[in-house]
Amino acid sequence: MVGSISLGHGANEFFSVALPPIIPLLVTDLGISYAQAGFLLTIFFVMYSIFQLPAGVLADRVGKKRLLVAGLAGMSGGIALAATAGSYETLLIAQAIAGISGSTFHPTGMSLISDVETGSTEGKAMGVFGFGGMVGTMASPVLIGGLAVFAGWRVALGVAAILGIVVTLVFIPLFSEPSDEQPADHSADERQPRPDGGRSFSFRSPLRSAMRVLNVPLTRGIAVLFCVTVLISLQSRAIQTFTTSYIAAGTGGSASVGNLGFFALLLGGSLSSLWAGSLSDRFDRGSLGVVAALGTALLVGATVFVARLPSGIPTELLFAFLAIWFFVIGAVMYACVPVKNALISEQAEREFSGSLFGVIQTASAIGSASGPAVFGVLATDWGIGAAYPAIAAVSLTLAALFFVLSRIAD
């Protein structure tokens, strides 16, 4: 089950960062500002945030598998609309559709994994889940960014939408249900779960499902994890959104040069999702989070020097430097994610795991919506060369919160 859910996670994340690799092209082609470009990501994650909890309620009615498949198909449709967009307003609508559709995935997928894994394996399982997402994210600058350079951004998005439909069709038979859930006995309580997480019909079921979120215990640990999740998502989405543009502006190169650094960032993150998840099963998770967040602050802050590279540096040496530097940033930054997810899984009991992950993923969507908007405005006012390194301040705050978590655990 972990493998099939991770595949779906990859498709979900691929579409969530479909626009960052082509932002320089959108700015030029549509005549928009970096602030407007950042808002395209913001509208996606605002919709993603608003519909997280309603998606959880709907999953209890129609079943998790059906909802996950519908969400993947909806995201493909949103990207297809973006490919045909003739205006900025149409892109906003396309991003809203994709965001609503994408909201279905994380609360259902992560809660299923948490329900079937034990305390000694949940870190590794979340690492595999994160790796699947990172592979999808990493594919975005390669496929969309690469195609956009040669065929234009519309063709690139159109091909991505077709690929999304194919993945959705492949995902259907690969998905396996948790082995400990049995088909409902219709002679029993009408609210008994169906195999895919749905419930038999009841007029009271939506209300009961909506109220489940109130059963999540508001402990200090969960409150801090909510804040940690906001900041991790704010940080990562800001970096994902503006890495291509920052490198292109700082080096005077093209979007393809920027996408090289973006790809290296995501490659480092995909590998770190695996080893960091395993480490979180062996060492104190709060302390691991502190180290990863401080390392991210140092590395992201030091990117200010990227904009000051000598103009005569050989192209091959420039490419090698950018690839290594952003690979390391990705490896350190994304190590926070499986550590955070394992800490959440510690708090999740089966009776409210879906609701807890719904609440936490709402926090993730809030951060994801805020990051591109906040740093898009800063990039417009200060210049992207100053705004991008400023993301390090978020990492420092994140380190402080992970330290608080390590004290609570003690």
Image (cartoon, helix red, strand yellow):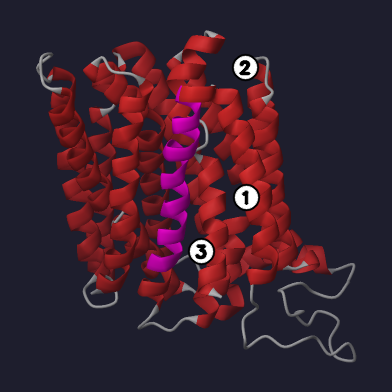
| Residue in view at x 51 percent, y 48 percent | 13
Q: CA distance from mark 2 to mark 1?
A: 23 Å
The magenta segment is: 127-149
Residue 268 got which mark? none
In front: mark 3 or mark 1?
Answer: 3
Badge 3 amino acid: Ser
- The quadrant of the picture occupied by the N terminus is bottom right
What is the three-letter code of the residue carrying label 1?
Ser
Chain-order first, disc 2 or disc 1: 2
Residue 128 shows in the view = yes
Q: Position of residue 330 (x, y in %)?
A: 28, 47
Q: Give the amino acid type for the residue marked by disc 2 in the picture.
A: Tyr
- Kindly identify which residue carries mark 1: 103
The residue that appears at 23% across and 40% down in the rendered structure is: 326
Q: CA distance from mark 3 to mark 1?
A: 16 Å
Task: State yes or no: discs 2 and 1 in contact (Cβ < 8 Å).
Answer: no
Closer mark to the observer between disc 2 and disc 1: 2
Residue 178 percent across, percent down from the top left: 62, 81
Looking at the picture, tell me which residue is in the foreground, 293 or 181.
181
Q: CA distance from mark 3 to mark 2?
A: 32 Å
Residue 137 in magenta stretch? yes
Majority secondary structure in the magenta region: helix
Disc 2 is placed on an element classified as helix
Query: Where is residue 352 drawn, in percent x and y?
Result: 59, 73
Q: Earlier in the sequence, mark 3 or mark 1?
A: 3
Q: Quadrant of residue 94?
A: top right
SS at mark 3? helix
Q: Are marks 3 and 2 in contact (CB under 8 Å)?
A: no
Whether residue 47 is visible here, answered yes or no, is: no
Residue wearing tag 3: 6
Question: What residue is pinned by disc 2?
Answer: 88
Res 223 quadrant in image: bottom left
